[in-house]
Every structure is written in C-alpha cells, then in structure tokens.
Amino acid sequence: MILKLIWRNLWRNSRRTLITMASIAFAVLFAILMKSFQNGVFNNLIKNVVGYYSGYVQIHQKGYWNEQVLDNCFALDNSLIEKLQQNPQINEVVPRLETFVLVSKENTTKGCMLVGTDAVKENNLTQLKNKLIDGSYFNNNEESVILAEGLAKRINAIVNDTIVLFGQGYHGAMAAGKFKIKGIVHLASPAMNDAFVYLPLSATQYYLSAENRLTSLSLGIANAENGNTIVENLKKTIGKKYEVMSWQEMMPEIANHIKADGFSFYVFSGILYLIIGFGLFGTILMMTIERTYEFGMLIAIGMKKGKLKMILLGEAFLITLLGVLLGILLSLPSVLYLQEKPIRFSGDIAKAYEQFGFEAIFPAELDLNIFFTQSLIVLFMSILIGLYPLWFVNGLNPVKAMKK
C-alpha cells in the first residue's frame, strides 16, 4: 500500500518529478564523464610513452640510467633471459641496443635515436607493425630501417630511399653505414615520432661494433598494476650487476604529472559535487515548499508524522534511484562514443601538449567501476539531501501549513 502511494505521489506532479530526476541524471552524467576523461587521458599518456616503447619495467647494466652511453651496455646473458622467462608475470622480454646517431639523406642531417631491436619481440610488446603508415615491416635477418614519420619528414625521406647513419660505436669505434628505408611508422609520442630509427638488433650490433651487447631489456608484464612488485622481486633474483627500474622511476615527470592531476581531480570533483548538491537541494526545497499544504492536511486528518516521513523517504529514494539509472543510461553511450572518437585539440593547445611529449588527445575510458562509484556517490548525496523534507515535516504545524 505504501509503495503504491509513493509511486502515485511521484507522478501526481510529473513535471516536478521529471525535473528532480533530470537534476540527478545530469549529476551522474557529469561525474562519470569527468572521471572517465581523467582515467582515459592518464592511461593514454602512459600507453603512448610507456606501453608504446619503454615497457613498464626495464633492466640495464648498473649505472646505465645515470649515464646513458653505449659503453655502459652489457653482454647478453642467457641465464638472465631464462630467469625472466620463468617469471609467470612477465610475458615478453625485448632486447634493445640504443644510442644517439646522426641520420643523413642528401644534404640534410638530423640527430636521432637508433633503436636496435628484435623485430618479432618488439612487435609483441609495442605492436610496432600496426603503426606502419607506409612500406612494410622488417625482419631480423635484413639490414633495413623503419623511420618514425616525423623524422622522415624532417629529412624528406620516403620508403625505399637510402639513408646514412653516422655515430660512435662501442668503445669509441667509428660507426657509419647505409641503410634502405623499408617502412615508416607513426608514433603517438611527438618526441619519439620526430627522432626514432628502428634497425634489427643483429645489424645494429654489427654497425656499432657491439656484438652480443645490449643497453636494455624491456619487459612486457601481464598486469601493469603489479609493476612495482615485479621490480622488487627481480632486484632480489637477478643480482646487483643489473639495475631494475619501473616506468615511474625512468619517467618521474610523467608520474608526478599524473599525481598532480589526480589531486586537481579531487578539487574539481569537490566543486562539481558542491554545485550538484546545491542544485539538488534547490529542487528538493522547491518540492517541499510546494507540498506544504498537502503535508499539513495529511497530518490534520490523522496521518502520523512517522508514516509521512517513511513515505517521503521512499519518494526520495525512488526518485533518486530512477535519476541515477537515467544518468547511467545517458553516460554509457557518451563514454563509448568518446572512447572511439576522442576529443582532439589542435593549434596552440596541441603544441603545448607536445612540449610535454604526448598528443593532445582526450579519450574517455569505459570502466564499470567508474559508473558504480560515481553513481553511488550521487545516490548517497541525493538521499542525504532528501532527508530535508523529513526534518521539515517533523517541525510542521498543520494549522499554519494549511493557512498558507
């Protein structure tokens, strides 16, 4: 009987109910979109810079990270590879030999990062083959290069052109060689896209006079959240000859940026919830004042205040629940759309983001935990505000209420 009465009360004034539901629905929509954007931007940043190249964990010769020169490379140890492959949390081990060299085509010379890598394992870790925009992918048995798109434009090079790489090899040896461009890739990080040259590992080792030597082992891990645990375990098992670093240690500026933005999210969330709260309270206050005569009459004809409060609490809960469900239905397609077609900035805004090393793309992330958490917060806040009519009824004088 009470449930039937609650339901009828809601739709006796459908405009009032719909306004309240809309307020709650848009509150849920804004809260979910804000959190989805934050997670999407952060994960896109990590994926572009970490997942697309460095890996979540790297192993180097002790001291290499503080002095990243070719002479601090290390000899490939099969026993180390075996230990890493036996770890169930590590799903890929990518050997790399990296150094800075000059790349020339005709009269144009630019500095670049030469990345010698295993073609198959590199593709397993970073999906490099999927980033090809021209040409084809290389294999481990050839001496051809893949250029990043930005670097190719800087030296005015296309597929099948020949470039010259010139630099310093291992222990000061002269390094010079001609290589054919087999493919051009687009890398999401602008800094990488303007500087990277990929060459098969064996060809790189021969070119740099660094046979069987590496500068790093990049590890692909099954769960990025276990990165720090994996780092600590590896430090105990592979010995002090090597340094094991998580991406947060290698790129503290990105980790600090995420922490700072995470704090700002809570500030903006607080402001958003404050605005939402005042909006909801205004709607509930309007509803309560409009029904003052009704409340006074119900009490005057004998309805106990306790039962009236129960009805009002039921109304508040039901209208809030309907509003939250509507908000979820509105936000789901919005998040899906923004995940597939993220907001992309251009002009000065894009240039500002590129200075920090990542594209000015703002994707949303579809995470059911976000929907649940944000909806629960708005639901709790709406029910809390919905207690106001109960307080109002508790001090209501029916005679005075019916005179208004």
Image (cartoon, grey):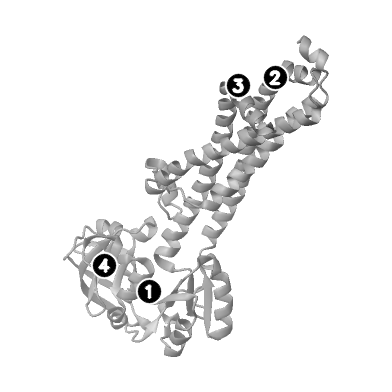
Q: Nearer the viewer, mark 2 or mark 4?
A: 2
Q: Name which of mark 4 and mark 3 comes first in the sequence.
A: 3
Q: Which mark is residue 144?
A: none
Q: Nearer the viewer, residue 329 or 215?
A: 329
Q: CA distance from mark 2 to mark 4?
A: 73 Å
Q: Secondary structure at mark 3?
A: helix
Q: Are marks 3 and 1 in contact (CB under 8 Å)?
A: no
Q: Secondary structure at mark 4?
A: strand
Q: CA distance from mark 2 to mark 3?
A: 12 Å
Q: Nearer the viewer, residue 353 or 390?
A: 390
Q: Which residue position holds label 4? A: 146
Look at label 3 and name its amino acid: Arg
Q: CA distance from mark 3 to mark 1?
A: 73 Å
Q: CA distance from mark 1 to mark 2?
A: 74 Å
Q: Which residue position holds label 3? A: 12
Image point 40% across, 44% down: which residue? 337
In the orientation shown, which residue stands out farthest toward the left? 160
